[in-house]
Image (cartoon, grey):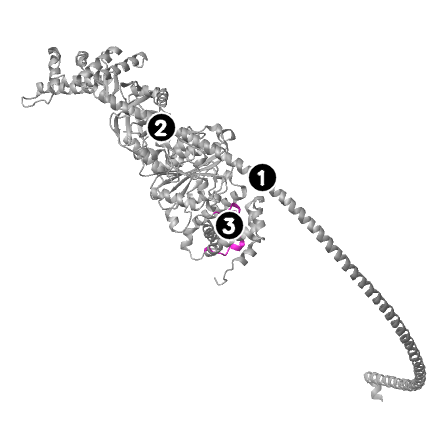
Amino acid sequence: MNNQQNEVGYVVSSRNFLVQLDGLPSIKINDMVQSETNLRGWVNSVSETQVEVLMVDEGTIKPKQQFKRLSSRLGVMVGDYLMGRAVNPLGVPIDGKGLLSKTQANPVMELDAEAPGIESREFIKTQFLTGITLIDTLIPLGQGQRELVLGDTHSGKTGFLIDIIVNQKNTGTICILALVGKPAVTVRNLIDTLRLNKALDYTVIIATSSSEPAPLIFLTPKTAFTVAEYFQKKGKDVLLILDDLGSHAKIHREIALLGNKSPGRESYPGDIFYQHAHLLERAGNFTPKYGGGSITALPVIELNLTDFTTLIPTNLMSMTDGHLLFKAGLRSQGQIPAVDISLSVSRVGRQTQDHVNNLLSTRIRQVLSQASDLETISRFSSELPPQTQLILRQRELIMEILKQEPLTAIPKQIQSILLALPFTTFFQDKNRRFIEKYKQIIIEAFQKNPTLLPITKAINTLRTDDELIKLLEGAGGILSKLCPTQKAN
Amino acid sequence: MEEILNIILKNTYSLSQLKHRLRILKSNLLKTFFGGENQTLNSTTQDLNWLESLPENFYRKFTKDNIYQIFADLEKKISNLPTLAMYLTFEPNDTTLYQVGSVARKTFNYPSLILDIKLDPNLIAGAALVWKGVYKDYSLRAKVENRKAEIIEGFKKYLK
Amino acid sequence: MSDLLQNPISLILAIITAITFLLYLREYNKRRNLESEGDKFLQDIKKKGWENLHQSIKKSQEILGEAELEGIKVIAGSEVELSKLENEYSKKLSQSLETSRRNIDAAQNKLMQFMADLQKKSAEFEEASKVSGQQRINQLFDKVENKLSDFLVQTAQKTSSSIELELKASRQLIDTYKNGQLKLIDENIITMMEQTLSLVLGKKMSLNDQLDLVYEALEKAKIEKFIA
């Protein structure tokens, strides 16, 4: 294209943010165009006579306005300068900290990249540690896994995700948080929370508020994945959180209905599955030849009253490697994180967990399922055999141990110890109050007390969970000294 | 069909002019076919002149039955005509339009070429053309931009 | 008696009683004999006992007398020994006292000498150390002076070189800024010229001239085959 010649198109019709142009003879999908009034848009679809453009800048479009073709395609400039900043999907900073320190060397990566094929993927072997006991032992995540986070409103999903980000401090993992159409106040609060917890240095935030044009909101997950791929190709491990894909689906539906595409089930367009699937396929664990890093994706979807049988949740459940179901009811009962263990699954996590933790989690799941079977009986009969009482008490202890306050992190060895404790004789007669009172003291004891420290260190050498339980029997004496109970119960 | 279009196009050079003339032709014909004496047309003398210049057999082609059909076909055909968009620094009146249009048709040997005149005063003089979606600037502005360096050199001679 | 002989049973009984009576008489005699023997024996024994007792008393008295004699001898002997020991002990004690007194005197003398020597030596040492101390201080001062002067020279050089670098950098910045501004100014000139031209030509250029330019554009487009 020489400097005097440029392709142009003229507006034939416009509807809100959707503009039909004619002309632009050699335009391709995902090229950028700009109007005379400097409003930009990207080409969404091309038909025989017309070109459909979605506007990313807000402004009035008049018929017969001229649109010039720009030399750039739909892409965003990526680089290390993005860390600690909040940007919109086109790379413009929105956190008020001034211009981005870009250099000429920063590449511009296209938003719509094809997901790498099978030859670039590697078996997921390392566990992704979240620092939250319930996840790391019972529903373990692997580096490169896609795990769907579903739940009602106010079930604690956002707090849980913030905890995971804060607990990645000093692990070298880069966190990318994509906020799709959230209110501007929420975006501001999240940025401030992360800054207070010193988690902003290794986090990139890509946010659109609900007042921005729909095409811009639609682009948010694509930008998030593009930035994630940039870091992954440098060999880093990336955590990508998409909050939330339900809004993204609604925006896609809005754009499609406005463009007169035929509505399908629940009025979503026919390619809604493709939109989410081709995004989530870009996550995974990659071989060194393709960069070597990994992208762990945690898409979020908000449900109505725990009904996960509607279209979008079922779609997302089929394209992810497991899901975590959050229930508002559990949260109001005091269990934080409010994950329903029996309904949540991680299909990839087992192969990443070490043997002891695997056996321990199997044992705990057995106890929990037995206890739920016995629960109905326990409500009716007053005199239960001691075995039943033991199982019910163990379940109480386990659920109390699994509760974790927001913004706390528990190291992996301590998690194993805490979950093996209900199976020792020392804890057989303790109840929930005991754990509630002394949990913090027990955790500190296993981290600092010189007699208990060898147990903590020896965990990596154990082979079965029975050995761990036997080791902990020996600690019973010290624990009873540290946690005095009144015998009068 | 072809003949009607050709007769109309003989004197019309710009798209807006064409659409305007079609509109008054249609309203005139409808008035003759369906309207009464009370309805008058708001048309300028130029329009009336053009209407009167149309030959007699032209009007005979239109009957009550085919008038709508004819106009629908005409509109379809017009959208397929080769259209040259031209950006001028001024808004031409009828005579200027006639001159420009005829020159254009002669130069490109397109007897049915239709111009789409747009106004862009930023072109200092001359015109910019758009053909089949490609825009090329032949105006004075483009020439100045091309010769920027030389012009600045010339200016600098007047500096110290 | 004939009754008795006629009855065998009573005969037997009478025999039996006669036998038993005889037996009893025998026994009684035996016992009497025994008793008399016993009495004799007892008397013998008594006699012997009294004899033994007499003898033993005599012997024991003899022994007691000997023992007393012995004891007196021993005591006398030990007193003599004791007095001998005392004399020897006192002699030895006095000897050792003498020797120790002499040693103490000798030691005292040595100590005094030693102290005197020590005083002398310490005085010498003080003087020597003063002198060497002064020397060292002088040396130190010299070194410090040298080092300081070197350091000052170096820092002067460094600061001057860094200042030069800074100057260069800032001059470069100024240059680039100047160039950028000049370019802007040039562009502004062009823009101003364009605007002036457009205003002027819009007012002053005749329609024919405008049209000529338009035709020229059309011609050019034809030549460049821009329009087929």
Q: Secondary structure at mark 1?
A: helix
Of the numbered discs in the image, which one, if any, rests on residue A263?
none
Tally of numbered discs? 3
State which chain disc 3 sits on.
Answer: A
Please state the horizontal and vertical placement of residue C184, each as a whole percent of the image: 36, 28
Q: CA distance from mark 1 to mark 2?
A: 46 Å
- The residue carrying mark 2 is C185
Q: Amino acid at mark 1?
A: Val
Q: Earlier in the sequence, mark 1 or mark 2?
A: 1
State which chain disc 2 sits on.
Answer: C
Asked if residue A430 is among those painted magenta in the image, a careful observer would answer yes
Q: Amino acid at mark 2?
A: Ile
Report crowding for label 2: few under 14, some 14 to 19, many 20 or more residues within 10 A (C-alpha).
Answer: few
Report crowding for label 1: few under 14, some 14 to 19, many 20 or more residues within 10 A (C-alpha).
Answer: few
- The residue carrying mark 1 is C153
Q: Are marks 3 and 1 on the same chain?
A: no
Please state the horizontal and vertical placement of residue C93, each as a whole percent of the image: 87, 72
- The residue carrying mark 3 is A418
Residue at 42%, 51% (x, y): give it.
A375
- Quarter of the image where the N terminus of chain A is located: top left
Tell me if residue A54 can be seen. yes
Q: Is residue A264 above or below residue A440?
A: above
Q: Amino acid at mark 3?
A: Leu
Q: CA distance from mark 3 to mark 1?
A: 67 Å
When asked about the image quadrant of residue A225, the answer is: top left
